[in-house]
Amino acid sequence: MPIFFLIVGALLIIVAINDKLRELGDLVRDDFSSSSGSPSFAVWLLAIFVAGSIGYVKELRPVANAFLVLIVVGMLLSNKGFFTKFSQSVSR
């Protein structure tokens, strides 16, 4: 956990030195706010948290795993053009 905070701190220092704090804030805000009816990052994070929490009950672990797989498939398919963008980034 301390390494995470060191990385975030270094990132914030670099962003501040380059005077790009407003752009970083806009990017983070766009990630957590919903646009064009698609679920935001916070909704996906909540879904993963709930499905993972169900997995702590030993009898419900297979159900939680199935929900997690369903969430991942939903994340991949909800971003229209994911496979096209992925193949473009791999071919570069």
Image (cartoon, rainbow, N blue to C red):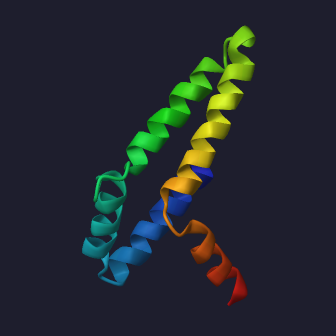
In the image shown, does 28 or 44 lie closer to the viewer?
44
Quadrant of the frame with the C terminus: bottom right
Left/right of residue 54 with respect to residue 37 in the rendered view: right
Residue 66 image position (x, y, % from top left):
69, 30
Count of numbered labels shown in the rendering: 0
Which percent across, then down, holds residue 58?
A: 74, 11
To which quarter of the image does residue 51 belong? top right
Residue 76's quadrant in the figure?
bottom right
Please report the residue visible at 45 percent of the width from the left and 35 percent of the height from the top.
Answer: 46
3, above or below 48, in the image:
below
Up the image or down, 57 lies above or below 12; here it is: above
Q: Residue at x 49, y 34 (%)?
A: 47
Q: State the image coordinates of residue 69 (x, y, percent, origin top left).
A: 67, 39
Horizontally, residue 81 falls left or right of residue 19, namely right
**Farthest-out residue, bottom:** 92
Name the quarter where the N terminus is drawn. top right
Residue ID at (67%, 17%): 56
Q: Is residue 53 above or below residue 1?
A: above
Residue 1 visible, this angle: no
Q: Is residue 64 visible?
A: yes
Residue 64 on image: x %, y %: 66, 24
